[in-house]
Amino acid sequence: MTSKKLYGKELKEFDDVDVDDLLTQLSAEELEILSKEVDPDDRFMPPDQRTNYHCEREATGPVDRKQLIDHINKIALETPDQPESVPFVAGVVRGKKWIPPEAPVIVSREDDGVSFNLEDEYEQALGTATEEELVDLAAILGFHSMMNQDQYHASLLNKGKVGLGWDGVTKASQPKALPYEPPNATDPEQSILKVYDDDSKTIELCFNNVNLTDDQFDRLFKALEINTRLEVLSLSNTGLTDRTAEKLAEALEKNATLRVINIETNQVSANGIVRLVKSMLVQKNVEEFRASNQLTAHVLGNKAEMDITQYIEQNTTLMRVGLFFEFNDARSRVANHLQKNIDRSKIFSFFFRLNHFLSSWLSFSFPA
């Protein structure tokens, strides 16, 4: 087997040759000739250096884009069309005519030749069954994909009329007119006074869709610091901002009875939500926190989500969080930790009931 040679030398002899030293020995003219022989495929190089063709003519002036386009259009209009070698004749087919392929024949169910061996009584029952009875049977067996919605629900509700038949199309049903929800009749001033007086009957307080002023927020959160009865506080769509959310965070650091907090649909930023989640680590009594659909924080961002995840993982009582996490890491970590808190709560509840049962059983005095 003969080895390949280049300029009388074997290719192995060129392995130790330094290409940079060879290039330094070339002159400018030789380098230009060498560049014309090489066509580098490098997208980082400018286009004029990636092609072998170099225009050596001097520029006649600045480029006028409109004038260039007008000139190209003028040349295109003035250039005559090339005459066809064979004139067009209507109805004459030249070349191979395209023939569409034959469509595959779909074998009907009758031609499948599939037979089922059923008992005589089953065949007689199915053969004499009406369409409504067959629809009921399909609904019982769970074949809801074989019928329309009217048929399926009518069969479940045991109605006489079961729809439009097997081949029928379900029509849109008229939606039921539901009455509008009445406006929130909560009186902010009286509710704030009840929270300040630590009213024993005020366990749940709902300010949803009630536009509160900053002064009312301040007085409510000040009263919340000394309250020992309130467990559920809903402040959805109340105009809560970062300044008033800071007051709420300070109140959460001192209140030890709140279990559910809802501040959805407000104007709290991502930093404000982080501050609220961090404040729950002081007392660790909040079990549910909802703060989604904020006007200024539709997307929390990576840093805020990581901070919220870190604070939630340190909280052992939080079991439900109403927040939208964009990143999968934060979403999965929060879900896993909340599930651990739920399992821990169930175990504590079981042992508490067991301890209560044993204590009551041991204290029971048997008759002599």
Image (cartoon, rainbow, N blue to C red):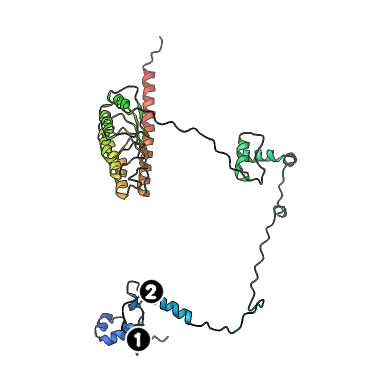
Snapshot quadrant of residue 126: top right
Q: Is there CB contact under 8 Å for labels 1 and 2?
A: no
Q: Residues within 10 Å of mark 2 (few under 14, many from 20)?
A: few
- Above or below residue 362? Residue 236 is below
Q: Position of residue 233 (x, y in %)?
A: 34, 31
Question: Looking at this rendering, what residue extends furthest in the bottom direction?
Answer: 8
Please state the horizontal and vertical placement of residue 69, each as a whole percent of the image: 41, 75
Q: Which label's residue is closer to the chain start, 1 or 2?
A: 1
| Residue 339: quadrant of the picture | top left
Residue holding disc 2: 66
- Residue 216's x, y, as percent? 28, 31
What is the total number of numbered labels drawn onto the structure image? 2
Q: Tell me if I can see residue 281 in this picture.
A: no
Q: Which quadrant of the figure contains the C terminus?
A: top left
Which one is nearer the viewer's eye here, 201 or 29?
201
Residue at x-position 31% and y-position 24% = 194
Mark 1 vs mark 2: give the one in front.
2
Q: Which residue is mark 1?
A: 10
